[in-house]
Image (cartoon, rainbow, N blue to C red):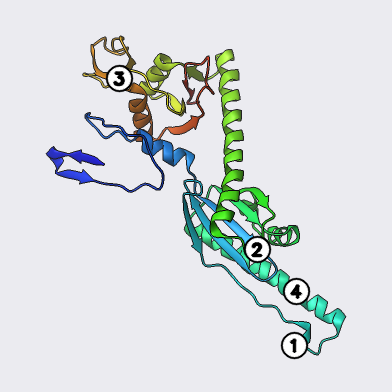
Amino acid sequence: MFSCQAQDLFDVFSLPISVRDQVVVGRGPDVAQLCAILATSEQSLVVAVDRQRSRLLRLECGDADVDEREAPIDETARQVDTNVELGSFERRHEELARQHYRHVARAVADELGERPAARIVLCGQQESVAGLEGYLPERVVALIAGRIALPLSGGRAELARAASEIIRAVRRQHQIELIDELRARASEGAGTVTGLAATLDALGAGQVETLVVEEGFEARGGRCRDCGQLVPDGALCTRCGAAPIPMENVVDAAITEAFTHHVALEFCEEADLAGLGHIGAFERR
């Protein structure tokens, strides 16, 4: 909930997942928890396919919010319904399957054109998944995070849960690689800062390209009453030397400021940045 009496504002937003209880009074809205949800809950698309049917499931916030979209279904002829010789019928049957995969590939591309997704998970038997993948555009193939050998008849929750596990694993691997890069570059002094004080300085100077924060990291601090610079607890403003206005959690303020200034946000698990002060940043090049 966000409220500002001076602007006659009282807005309530429904979220698909829980957030921690928190009350913040300040000169602007504290959106740190919303930023964390946005950064860690990418839009994903599950594409389930067999030789005749398909399903498209939109995932948001993991498997907490699932939206099933309309997807192609192509009926195939049966040998009993035709007078075609067996060999010709088999060729016809294969061509109908290929036609179905083309329809599904087109539907996936159209869906992504309307609502982009960060990752795609393919679902179905290996033959059908491979058949579909052969018709997907390269830009779509580049988004594939993994494949699941589950039948289309599976429940929506089952498909979403299995896809979410793959997406979480891919995202965790991305976090590990990012942290390794931050550590390596910090040890070389190459375009990174770590620790609360240095990160707040870089953020205030507009030098941060990507802010990396441990989930749940909190620290007292302050904001300069004159220039707005964020500082750790007990420090004076590093820009003008003024005494700051105390804040219960300067980390949330830093996240909100980063979001406001279009700085990329990455959140990692607790203790991932052990030895680096629980927070760091990649600087602009």
Tag nearer the camera, 3 or 4: 4
> Marks 4 and 1, Cα distance to the nearest angstrom?
17 Å
Q: Residue at 50% of width from left, 61% of height from top?
A: 68
> 16 or 201, which lies in front?
16
Q: Residue at 42% of width from left, 23% of height from top?
A: 217
Residue 230 position (above or below residue 144): above
The residue pinned by badge 4 equals: 95
**What residue type is disc 1 on?**
Asp
Q: 112 left or right of 30?
A: right
**What residue type is disc 4 on?**
Glu
Q: 176 left or right of 68?
A: right
> 191 or 107, which lies in front?
107
Q: Position of residue 283 (x, y in %)?
A: 48, 24
Residue 7 position (above or below residue 131): above
> 218 or 32, which lies in front?
218
Query: N-terminal of the two: label 3 or label 2?
Result: 2
Q: Residues within 10 Å of mark 3 (few under 14, many from 20)?
A: many
The residue pinned by badge 1 equals: 81
The residue pinned by badge 2 equals: 49
Residue 260 position (above or below residue 63): above
The residue pinned by badge 3 equals: 229
Q: Secondary structure at mark 3?
A: loop
**What residue type is disc 3 on?**
Gln
> Marks 3 and 2, Cα distance to the nearest angstrom?
53 Å
Tag nearer the camera, 3 or 1: 1
Query: N-terminal of the two: label 2 or label 1?
Result: 2
Q: Position of residue 160 (x, y in %)?
A: 55, 53
Please say if the residues under marks 4 and 1 sit with CB atoms less than 8 Å apart: no
> Marks 2 and 4, Cα distance to the nearest angstrom?
16 Å
Q: 203 left or right of 153?
A: left
Q: Residue at 56% of width from left, 31% of height from top?
A: 175
Please say if the residues under marks 2 and 1 sit with CB atoms less than 8 Å apart: no
